[in-house]
């Protein structure tokens, strides 16, 4: 089940380049602007608050050399801005600004733009802003996040199962608690180490950099991970006490209330680092996110605990209690899920037109299957409880009938055998041992319930009860498998820009009223000579007519002349394309004045570079075209 979920996570997580959630709203100077005099600052404004890094800004002069800048900070104390001071003397020409920040929901964002002083340069300095995420680091980070979700659900859900459902023998569940605790500890440490390379977009080897780790510990995501580690300490101490044999303490109301505090704290470490921490109605969203996470853990983690209980010590009463607990959890999930979906989408079209909306539809489909499996489990539970109640009632009636029959038999013996006035039976010698009197023939009462004060016997499991228990075990296993896949969609959703953010970014216009151009850098192999790059600019980068400019750079970053450069665009979702940009060599760069992109969506841009008379190489990139 875990392996299958990880494979789905890798497929979904590697389907395309990762997107951050803080979207650039405007720049000052504006992208492509020509200024009469050099600016003193560069200021960026985003759709949400952002965190800054030591390398948040790189400013390159017209020759490609890095300009010495001041320390990055927020403009006027506004957390949704980033500003850096420029030196007083900037020469004439075009400057390139590469930036990198961390969104409020802990995802990195990067990009670049240009401005000119006096007049534009013949060519802009080539700059590679780097990927938002290193592929290997991103994959390891996604796996660690998924396992952390899974471990938290197992730890919180199993503890809630012991406290609320009161299984007859909680000892087998201790292994689940310990496994959840150790997995959450390991994944939290892994996330803490991977945080620096994840933010910087570098390989996982950077996780061993002590300076980078020290910087991580001062950021909000790093602090939240430290809080999660601190919360695991008292939880671990409770597990140690439980392992020493205090098996009933975990099921007392006081222990259940005490366990709620660290559970809420763990949920807060997720809520404060994800979508709920940014956007509209943050306090309400944080509360909803915590409740959603706890309800998910109680339900999904409880399913695993229920499977273990059904395997070791099946008990109909425990199953019935979990059925009621799961129903309450589902109710909380529905209410909080509807609110979070509304908050994340922002509009009905975003449900089908954004990646977030499509992933949400997939998750809802998985939840629907999960609820169907839960309904089947609920029916098996009701049938098993009914059969168990009937068996218990039958056993109780048999015990009562047996007791009444024994009393009548004893009375008949007393009637047939006269008693002397002294109270002994006839034939008993005076002062001697009592003589044995024969009981009436017939089966002799035996077993529990035949003596005074004996307990009623437990009903023997019937064939129907055993069948219902097997059916319940199979349906609960199906629930757990589907739940693992739903948790994958949840993990991917937390790393996808909400539809509301994507819509806001599409409508964002810089202060000057000019839509920013779309700039894409595509690396390509030149064989033994190394790797070159193609910088492609779409202006305005929206639906309709666009101007295209493409510049080819060699391995050393200088302009490179190539025999041919072709560029085409395809929209696979709508079956549009390929549309040829019909680039023309302008002597140093390639351009096309009229490329029409008729529909919004995620287009596939294919660049084919002929590096010699007989060799060519093709690379593709996905770009988002908004209306």
Image: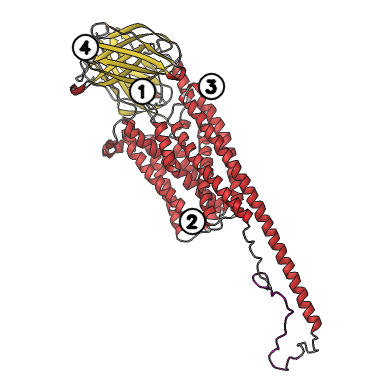
130 and 285: which is toward the camera: 130
Residue 280 shows in the view? no
Q: Which residue is mark 2?
A: 172
Disc 4/disc 1 C-alpha distance (Å) = 37 Å
Stretch in magenta: 427-449
Q: Which residue is mark 4?
A: 561
Q: Position of residue 390 (x, y in %)?
A: 69, 56
Q: Which residue is mark 1?
A: 82
Q: Give yes or no for contact between labels 1 and 2 (Cβ–Cβ under 8 Å).
A: no
Residue 160 magenta-drawn?
A: no
Which numbered disc covers residue 347? 3
Q: Secondary structure at mark 2?
A: helix
Q: Nearer the viewer, mark 2 or mark 4?
A: 4
Residue at 74% from the left image edge and 73% from the top image edge: 406
285 and 557: which is toward the camera: 557
> Is 93 situated left or right of 188 in this image?
left
Q: Secondary structure at mark 4?
A: loop
Which tag, 2 or 4, sits closer to the chain's start? 2
């Amino acid at each position: 089940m875990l392996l299958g979920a990880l494979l789905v996570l890798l497929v979904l997580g590697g389907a395309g380049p990762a997107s951050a959630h803080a979207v650039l709203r405007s720049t000052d100077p504006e992208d492509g602007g020509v200024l009469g005099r050099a600016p003193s600052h560069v200021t960026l404004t985003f759709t949400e608050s952002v965190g800054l890094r030591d390398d948040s800004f790189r400013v390159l002069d017209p020759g490609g050399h890095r300009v010495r800048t001041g320390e990055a900070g927020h403009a006027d104390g506004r957390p949704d801005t980033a500003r850096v001071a420029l030196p007083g003397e900037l020469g004439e020409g075009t400057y390139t600004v590469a930036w990198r920040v961390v969104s409020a929901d802990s995802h990195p964002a990067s990009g670049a733009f240009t401005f000119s002083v006096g007049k534009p340069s013949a060519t802009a300095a080539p700059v590679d802003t780097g990927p938002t995420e290193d592929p290997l680091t991103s994959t390891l980070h996604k796996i660690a996040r998924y396992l952390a979700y899974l471990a938290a659900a197992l730890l919180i859900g199993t503890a809630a199962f012991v406290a609320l459902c009161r299984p007859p023998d909680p000892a087998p569940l201790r292994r689940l608690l310990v496994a959840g605790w150790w997995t959450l500890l390991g994944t939290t440490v892994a996330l803490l180490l991977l945080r620096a390379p994840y933010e910087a977009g570098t390989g996982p080897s950077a996780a061993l950099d002590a300076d980078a780790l020290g910087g991580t510990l001062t950021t909000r995501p790093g602090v939240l991970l430290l809080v999660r580690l601190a919360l695991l300490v008292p939880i671990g101490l409770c597990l140690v006490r439980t392992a020493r044999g205090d098996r009933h303490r975990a099921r007392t109301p006081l222990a259940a209330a005490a366990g709620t505090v660290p559970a809420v704290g763990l949920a807060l470490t997720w809520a404060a680092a994800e979508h709920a921490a940014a956007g509209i109605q943050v306090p309400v969203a944080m509360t909803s996110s915590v409740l959603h996470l706890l309800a998910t853990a109680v339900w999904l983690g409880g399913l695993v605990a229920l499977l273990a209980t059904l395997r070791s010590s099946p008990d109909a009463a425990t199953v019935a209690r979990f059925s009621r607990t799961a129903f309450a959890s589902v109710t909380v999930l529905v209410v909080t899920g509807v609110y979070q979906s509304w908050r994340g989408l922002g509009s009905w079209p975003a449900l089908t037109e954004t990646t977030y909306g499509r992933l949400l539809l997939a998750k809802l489909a998985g939840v629907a299957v999960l609820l169907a499996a839960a309904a089947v489990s609920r029916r098996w539970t009701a049938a098993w409880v009914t059969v168990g109640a009937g068996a218990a009632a039958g056993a109780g009636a048999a015990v009562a009938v047996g007791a009444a029959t024994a009393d009548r038999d004893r009375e008949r013996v007393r009637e047939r055998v006269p008693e002397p006035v002294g109270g002994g039976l006839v034939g008993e010698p005076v002062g001697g041992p009592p003589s044995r009197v024969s009981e009436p023939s017939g089966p002799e009462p035996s077993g529990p319930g035949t003596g005074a004060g004996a307990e009623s016997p437990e009903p023997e499991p019937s064939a129907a009860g055993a069948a219902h228990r097997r059916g319940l075990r199979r349906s609960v296993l199906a629930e757990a498998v589907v739940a693992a896949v739903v948790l994958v969609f949840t993990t991917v959703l937390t790393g996808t820009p909400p539809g509301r953010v994507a819509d806001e970014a599409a409508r964002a216009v810089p202060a000057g009223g000019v839509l920013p151009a779309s700039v894409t850098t595509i690396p390509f192999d030149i064989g033994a000579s190394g790797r070159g790059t193609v910088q492609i600019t779409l202006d305005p980068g929206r639906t309709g007519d666009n101007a295209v400019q493409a510049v080819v750079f060699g391995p050393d970053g200088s302009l490179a002349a190539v025999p041919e450069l072709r560029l085409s665009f395809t929209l696979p979702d709508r079956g549009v394309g390929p549309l040829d940009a019909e680039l023309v060599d302008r002597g140093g760069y390639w351009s096309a004045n009229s490329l029409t992109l008729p529909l919004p969506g995620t287009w596939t841009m294919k660049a084919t570079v002929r590096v010699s008379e007989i060799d060519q190489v093709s690379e593709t990139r996905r770009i988002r075209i908004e209306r």
